[in-house]
Amino acid sequence: MTITIRQKALANDNISLYLDIYDGGKRKFEFLSLYLLPEVDAETKARNEETLQRAHQIRAERILHPETIPEVGHLMIVKEIPNDESPEVLDWIQTYIDWMSDNTDYSKAIVDQSKYLKYLMSEFLANKRRPHITLRKFDKEWFKAFFLWLKNDYVPQKYVRVEAKPLCEGSLHNVQQRIVAVFNKAVKFGKLKANPFYQLEKSDIFPKPKTSHKQYLTPDELKRFMASDERSPGVAEAQRAFGFACLTGLRISDIKALRWSDIKRNKETNTLVIVQKKTKALNAVPIGNTALSWMPPKGDDDFVFHLPAKANVDAALKRIAKKVGIEKNISFHCARHTFGILVQAVTGNIETTKKLMGHKSLKSTAIYADVLTNEKVKAVDNTKKAFRGRKQREENKQIPRTKRTAATNTHPRRIIFLQDNK
């Protein structure tokens, strides 16, 4: 049997270490979840030396004790802790999920993210052959191994038969937030003395991804979008629902659940009163005449809109956008961003926008004010065009009238003036 340490270059410039095991004409590989980092400073170089040393220790262990070679993954060392009565990690995550499910302060999305964490953790611990590891034994080294596995080794189930795609930065950060919350709760309930996560170096954790640009439609683009004549009933329904959401801020889950009975009518206004599917919070939004005109005729049942699967809705919206010349990546959630931008632009009051959007925190609403600030910066930058126009007019004053008339006779503003006189 020969066992060789080999290296595999990764897309993020790190190097993955693995064992090339050749025995009796058969070859197998054991990935160690150990990684060399680009040596940008002395500290990184020292860490890489420790990592290589650990790889050589594992290789020596496999040579001396071939029975320890796992079928898959790498059997990580678990330190012995006397009188360890802490619950198993997977059991505690389930306890945390059950606790959140009974607490109205937590949305369904957060509960679902915690369930996803349990799935990932079960896959990771199965890979490491330690499904029953306890909270106290899951120290900072296990945290690091879990994060590295998520970033470099985990392949989502939907990509198993196609080209593998790693989890995006946002997903990695969300999983990190969930496991930190799970261990913080363990500390609060006396299952742990401290959360090992806070012992990690900054380079070991997933940073919060930079805020991405939220796609939205301008008033002119929304008019063009809704003016498109759609003959297909399904596409027309998606168009109406999207337009209605642009003026009410409803998510697609709320649109699908919307009933005619949710609309409270009186002499002065029509108001939409719903319990949001995502946050479980009650929200009331006035409905303007334009939004009312984009609603479908009342059918036999109480539901307002009848939409297909979200993927089909988004596909229909993209077709309409392309048809009317809108070069933006449109999805149904773009409608909610459009509503937020419109409200913030009209009111200039972030608190009002927060209430109409149904946000629990101003942090979620602040992005719409930020977008408008960026637009204002662009507007200021564009003022230099006006100064260029002024400079041109001053130069024209220096040209004799007969020449200036000939030079400016085809100017668009001159044409418009003549048309107005007609």
Image (cartoon, grey):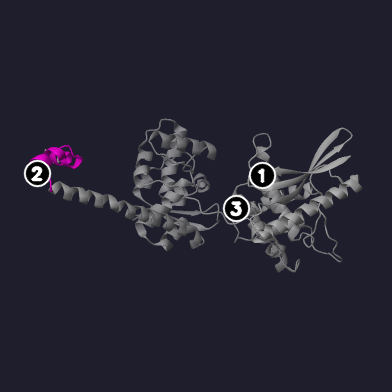
Q: Residue at x 78, y 63 (%)?
A: 136
The residue that mark 3 highlights is 109
Q: Are marks 2 and 1 in contact (CB under 8 Å)?
A: no
391 and 305: which is toward the camera: 391
Say which mark, if any, is on residue 378: none
Could you tell me the amino acid type at mark 3? Answer: Ala
Relative vertical location of residue 374 with respect to residue 85 in this rendering, above or below: above
Q: Position of residue 175 (x, y in %)?
A: 65, 53
Is residue 410 on the magenta stretch? yes
Left or right: residue 381 versus residue 47 is: left
Front residue of this view, candidates 192 and 110: 192
Q: Which residues are magenta?
A: 398-418
Helix, strand or loop for the magenta stretch, by majority: helix
**Which residue is found at the position 35% from the left and 39% from the top?**
224
Q: Mark 2 Cα within 10 Å, few/some/many (few <14, many 20+)?
A: few
Of the image marks 3 and 1, the number of the one nearer the N terminus: 1
